[in-house]
Image: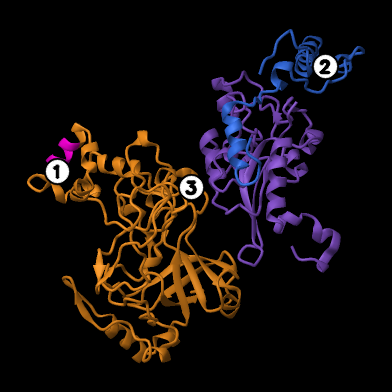
């Protein structure tokens, strides 16, 4: 079975935020909630890099490990989803997640946390596929429609890759080999430190 | 391949090369350099010589296509009756003068593509724009320059009447030098685009997805300039323009992206004027979600001699915390 | 969310517990002898089934993202 992955080619990302915008429009995500965001490191300096981040749909997801109500489940496509019927908005998953994926709407008079919202890999939730109930809670279910996540499908520089991990890894590997620089020499500086420039 | 695609949609033209690409057939996105500057100058042809795109029926330079050119080549017989009727209607008494650009039938483009030629001609590129005030670009100091000592050697163009309007750039430049504006306003100010924005930003800032991405007008200030002025990242500061005591209140983005002595602002904001929120003056329901100061509140005099385009890219400013 | 008798999960346990404690009142019923241990939420096969398919849309995505590098087939 194909395992769904996201991969952001940081040598191509131009921080246009189109993935963020497309995601919010596709799923009607409210102001202040970001299922996806673009992170820029070394902003304004030489070697500035941007990378588009969302839920990475971990194999052994830390969010699921800490959830006190066990609202997470992994689909056969290796997509990590959760049930908003069960979620109690405790925020444990926010602390567990290394990518800052879980988001919480502010509800009530004191801005207390509502039920968690995160990237669904455009795969909806536990409700019946493509139902109104599913759309209202989790947004659209493009995977069930035979499509890939919208953020990746419309990436203007083809930086954000999504789909079968094997295939997108092959695409990225070929790019890297052809480029031969930057992330093309991924991990080299870890191995060789300053003795090598990439 | 870049825009534009020629002919009617059913031709499925893939798009146009940049400048020229003679290695491809015009139907595959190849083509010639546009014959845009006339046929001949100083006795020399301005059309291409020994250069044409792959598969071209014409194997030398050729001018832009008109009905007259089409007739001369005998290709006008390939027009359909409907296409010819449209061209005749447009041409009125002088059908030969109808160019491809006003041929609404698309017939001339279609026939040219069939013959492997570009309807806009096959000409030479030029480095000398003889019909512009500076045929070859020369250096001219900005009207508000941080280097006043260079103005004597590299002045802006003399004052003159352009179309209906006076352009007194040189007087303004001289005035700025005489009053030593650069000492009071030592920071170069330039403006530019944020990638997700369009124009003045009214539409972009009215879109709830896009408005959320950048919620405050800001100025990029160099780390050194910020340290001199005690400015912290994210702090509200004032930027003063070099003309008429104009000032705007914006957030500071302290960054090394701009060099020492340079500040940059996006041109996509409006709705605040010199520190005042003008939201109440928008007609009901038309106010964008986020408002901010407009950078052009503090940009200064200067107009392009040919197009009349204003000078929003090179001026001076001063930045202070209050 | 599909709940019902076909899926005896953690919630139906809680529901049963709630009914029991309401009828029995406070006291002994808080620690019933025959407590069933709480089960992790077990989504049904329908919820976790694979939805990804290599449709024309998906194939076109892979093709266009590999334009520069992947050998054309």
Residue topped by disc 1: B90
Q: What chain does badge 2 belong to? A: C
* View extreme (left): residue: B93
Quarter occupied by residue B239 = bottom left
Magenta region: which residues?
B84-90
The reply to whether label 3 and label 2 mark residues of one chain is no
Percent coordinates x, y for residue C51 in the rendering: 66, 23
Q: Nearer the viewer, mark 2 or mark 1?
A: 1
Residue A141 makes an appearance in the image: no
Task: Report the side of B108 relative to A47 (left or right).
Answer: left
Judge the density around disc 2: few (<14), some (14-19), many (≥20) Cα neighbours within 10 Å.
few
- Quick one: B60 or A31, which is closer to the camera? B60
Percent coordinates x, y for residue A118 in the rendering: 65, 36
**Residue that appears at 52% across and 50% down:** B213
- Looking at the colours in the rendered structure, which chain would you say is drawn in purple? A
Judge the density around disc 1: few (<14), some (14-19), many (≥20) Cα neighbours within 10 Å.
some
Q: Kindly report the distance in space between the C-alpha atoms of the residues bearing marks 2 and 1.
A: 94 Å
Query: Which quadrant of the figure contains the C terminus of chain A?
Result: bottom right
* View extreme (right): residue: C33
């Amino acid at each position: 079975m194909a395992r769904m992955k996201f991969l952001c080619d940081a040598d191509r990302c131009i921080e246009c935020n189109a993935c963020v915008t497309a995601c919010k429009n596709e799923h009607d995500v409210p102001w202040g909630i970001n299922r996806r965001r673009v992170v820029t490191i070394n902003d304004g300096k030489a070697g500035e890099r941007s990378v588009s981040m969302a839920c990475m749909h971990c194999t052994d997801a830390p969010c699921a490990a800490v959830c006190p109500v066990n609202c997470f489940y992994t689909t056969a496509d290796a997509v990590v989803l959760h049930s908003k019927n069960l979620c109690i908005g405790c925020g444990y998953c926010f602390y567990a997640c290394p990518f800052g994926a879980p988001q919480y709407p502010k509800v009530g008079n004191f801005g207390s946390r509502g039920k968690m919202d995160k990237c669904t890999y455009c795969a909806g939730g536990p409700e019946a596929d493509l139902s109104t109930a599913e759309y209202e809670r989790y947004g659209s279910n493009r995977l069930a429609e035979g499509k890939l996540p919208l953020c990746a499908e419309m990436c203007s520089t083809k930086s954000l890759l999504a789909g079968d991990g094997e295939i997108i890894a092959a695409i990225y590997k070929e790019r890297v080999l052809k480029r031969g620089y930057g992330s093309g020499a991924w991990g080299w500086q870890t191995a060789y430190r300053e003795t090598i420039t990439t | 391949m870049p825009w534009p695609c020629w002919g009617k949609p059913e031709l499925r033209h893939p798009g146009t090369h940049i400048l020229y690409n003679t290695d491809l057939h015009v139907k595959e996105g190849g083509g010639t350099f546009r014959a845009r500057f006339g046929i001949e100058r100083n006795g020399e042809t301005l059309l291409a010589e020994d250069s044409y795109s792959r598969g071209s029926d014409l194997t030398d330079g050729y001018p832009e296509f008109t009905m007259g050119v089409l007739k001369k080549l005998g290709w006008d017989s390939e027009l359909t009756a409907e296409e010819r009727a449209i061209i005749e209607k447009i041409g009125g008494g002088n059908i030969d003068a109808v160019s491809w650009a006003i041929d609404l039938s698309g017939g001339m483009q279609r026939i040219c593509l069939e013959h492997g030629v570009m309807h806009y001609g096959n000409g030479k590129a030029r480095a000398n724009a003889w019909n512009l005030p500076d045929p070859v670009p020369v250096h001219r100091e900005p009207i508000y320059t941080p280097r006043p000592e260079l103005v004597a050697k590299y002045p802006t163009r003399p004052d003159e009447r352009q179309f209906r309007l006076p352009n007194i750039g040189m007087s303004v430049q001289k005035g700025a030098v005489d009053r030593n504006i650069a000492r009071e306003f030592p920071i170069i100010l330039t403006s530019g685009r944020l990638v997700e924005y369009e124009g003045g930003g009214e539409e972009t800032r009215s879109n709830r997805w896009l408005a959320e991405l950048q919620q405050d007008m800001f100025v990029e200030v160099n780390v050194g300039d910020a340290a001199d002025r005690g400015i912290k990242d994210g702090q509200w500061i004032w930027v003063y323009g070099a003309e008429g005591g104009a000032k705007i209140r914006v957030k500071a983005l302290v960054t090394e992206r701009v060099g020492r002595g340079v500040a940059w602002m996006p041109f996509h904001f409006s709705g605040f004027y010199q520190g005042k929120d003008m939201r109440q003056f928008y007609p009901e329901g038309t106010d964008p979600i986020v408002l901010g100061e407009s950078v052009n509140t503090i940009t200064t005099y200067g107009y392009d001699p040919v197009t009349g385009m204003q000078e929003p890219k090179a001026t001076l400013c001063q930045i202070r915390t209050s | 969310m599909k709940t019902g008798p076909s899926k005896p999960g953690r919630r139906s346990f809680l529901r049963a517990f709630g009914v029991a404690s309401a009828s029995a009142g406070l006291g002994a019923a808080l620690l019933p002898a025959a407590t069933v241990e709480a089960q992790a939420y077990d989504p049904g096969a329908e919820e976790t089934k694979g939805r990804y398919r290599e449709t024309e849309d998906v194939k076109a995505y892979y093709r266009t993202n590999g334009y520069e590098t992947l050998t054309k087939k």
